[in-house]
Image (cartoon, rainbow, N blue to C red):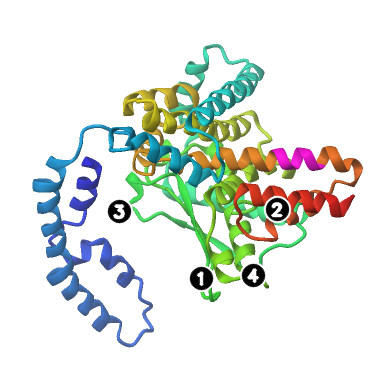
Amino acid sequence: MQRVANQIQLQLVDNPEESPFFNVFIDIPENIQDRETIQSMARDVIKSKVIPAYYKLNDFFTEEYLPASRTTYGVLDLPNGFEWYENLARYHTTTDLTPDEIHEIGLSEVERIRSEMQEVIDSLGFDGSFNDFLVFLRTDPQFYYETEDELLEAYLATSKKIDPEMVSLFKVLPRTPYGIKPIPMESAPDTTTAYYMRPAADGSRAGYYYVNLYRPDVRPKYEIEVLSVHEAVPGHHLQIALAMELEGIPNFRKYSGYTAYVEGWGLYSESLGYDIGLYSDPYSRFGALTYDMWRAVRLVVDTGMHYKGWTRQEAIDFFTANAAKTEQDIINEIDRYLVMPGQALAYKIGQLKILELKNKAKKQLGDDFDIKEFHHAVLSQGALPLAVLEENIETYLLEVK
């Protein structure tokens, strides 16, 4: 909660032009006739209404709310915490898996991915332990850009490389484009590495892939490819924009989603990077593996903190020992899991189900398996509970056979 206090204090400025709320008014085009009038009105409102409200919020938060906050972490310390978390696990994964079963799946995946990561380390002839290699990746300047502009350019260049390859994997592509924007600096220090914002329903705004440019020295080059396929295409933008463009289904099917499906698809999409020529150097391949490891670790630490009594520091230590994420990213992630119990379980559980269905289709169809048709079967009905997705794929297999 102390991090929330720090975020509030960023709003406590004397000059209204220094407020994050004024940023949008700075960029009003010069050809807007009332530009100066609008900016003057914005200054007045921010100075007289917004800033005083934040001072009031800060006083309440620091003097009343923060001192009354609990000192424990997981939901298991709340009334009916175990039962609540069991329900959250079912809700977020759309399965009947128990937290104990999910914890074991996570440990198994961590072991499997750790073995593949070690193979990459061995191929590089690195002289040192697994942990030594992670320290090397986190600290060697060769893996980081020096400026925010360089980092943003790398994201833009990667997307330009990926976009043309989508025709080899998909039968239908979304009509709605996407763009790339930096995460606002006032929130970037306490925000995850990247996120996606869906397009406007009326088509007036594209989808956007937001990237964190805060401290380029903790944003590794070897993560850019895997992050881009997850958040943009073939990941979130492709799946969500396609769902919004579907015809013949009600709006709630177009615009709502099941986390296990949506994030499962995003994580599954990371594996498609291999099919389009990404991860061609050992470090980028290690980056892809570390992102897969990241989601496997989530199964362990989320259930650990909320169901098995782990402390925040135990979760940070487990994460640090197994994934090549930077310290800043790891802390942000662990704090996210604390305030969103169970949500982080959806990614890996959803990915594993899609991979299971893909392998089943390959086995049953043999030479008749078509990756474009399989993807169409997965995507053509919008986001679904995993059990319903499985039923749809069973129908697709019967139709093909």
Locate residue 282, reporting x and y percent. 64, 28
Which amino acid is tagged 3? Glu
Q: Does the magenta stretch mainly form a helix, a strand or a loop?
A: helix
Q: Please tell me which residue lies in front, 86 or 281.
A: 86
The structure residue drawn at horizontal position 23% and vertical position 75%, both measured from the top left corner, is 42
Left-right relation of 11 to 81? left
What SS does tag 2 mark? helix
Can you tell which mark lies on residue 99?
none
Locate residue 337, reporting x and y percent. 39, 39
Evaluate if marks 2 and 4 touch, with contact meaning CB atoms under 8 Å apart: no
Residue count near mark 2 (Cα–Cα under 10 Å), binned few <14, some 14–19, many ≥20: many
- Mark 2 or mark 4: which is in front? 4
CA gap between label 2 and label 3 equals 38 Å
Evaluate if marks 2 and 3 touch, with contact meaning CB atoms under 8 Å apart: no
What SS does tag 4 mark? loop
Q: Which residues are magenta?
A: 356-361
CA gap between label 4 and label 1 equals 18 Å
Which amino acid is tagged 4? Ile
Outermost residue toward the bottom in this view: 33
Which amino acid is tagged 2? Val
Asked if residue 217 can be seen in this view, the reply is no
Question: Which residue has dot 2 on it?
Answer: 378
Question: Which residue has dot 4 on it?
Answer: 249
Question: Which residue has dot 3 on it?
Answer: 186
In the image, residue 71 lies in the stretch drawn in magenta:
no
Evaluate if marks 3 and 1 touch, with contact meaning CB atoms under 8 Å apart: no
- Mark 2 vs mark 3: which is more N-terminal? 3
Locate residue 349, reporting x and y percent. 58, 39
- Mark 1 vs mark 2: which is more N-terminal? 1
Asked if residue 21 can be seen in this view, the reply is yes
